[in-house]
Image (cartoon, helix red, strand yellow):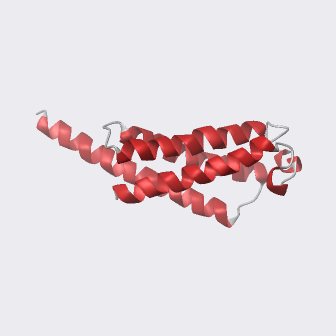
Amino acid sequence: MKKLLIGLHFLVGFGAIAGGLGAVMNPTMPMGMSTDALKLGPFDSFLVPGLFLMLIIGVGNVISGIILFKKHPIWVYFSGFEAVALVLWIVIQCIILQSIVALHVIFFTFGTIQGLIALYYFTRDTLKLSVLNR
């Protein structure tokens, strides 16, 4: 399961870096999307959402994948955070854009899988420690 999680972190991370970079480089019309799509949101351009996508979702997932690959003990916290961030990002995006497309469903699913794997390892390791400390 950890190999799947590493793969998801890198897939989501590099995709988000690319998408965020597109929004940062052209914040008024990234990839052909008009700022009219943001009429229900708090932003006038895609600059802030692009930075969030690129840095928090993108770079964060790449760092999470590296931390997990190197087997650092805090990996589960990074993976869990990135999973929650991705799922919330997708939900908020769908609300603001007032639409759901295939990529939303796919990346929501990726975030859910990331979260479930992180939760599994967190609870398994936490329960193991609590039993050993008795």
User: Residue 20 or 128: which is nearer the viewer?
Assistant: 20
Residue 41 drawn above or below residue 116: above
Residue shown at 84% from the left, 56% from the top: 32
Residue 134 at x, y percent in the picture: 10, 33
**Horizontal side of residue 131 vs 94, given as left or right:** left
**Can residue 79 be spotted in the picture?**
no
**Can residue 103 be spotted in the picture?**
yes
Residue shown at 76% from the left, 45% from the top: 23
Residue 114 at x, y percent in the picture: 45, 53
Residue 105 drawn above or below residue 89: below
Residue shown at 81% from the left, 37% from the top: 43
**Horizontal side of residue 55 vs 134, given as left or right:** right
Question: Quarter-wise, where is residue 74 in the image?
Answer: top left
Residue 9 at x, y percent in the picture: 48, 51
Residue 65 at x, y percent in the picture: 44, 47
Residue shown at 48% from the left, 56% from the top: 8
Viewport quadrant of the N terminus = bottom left
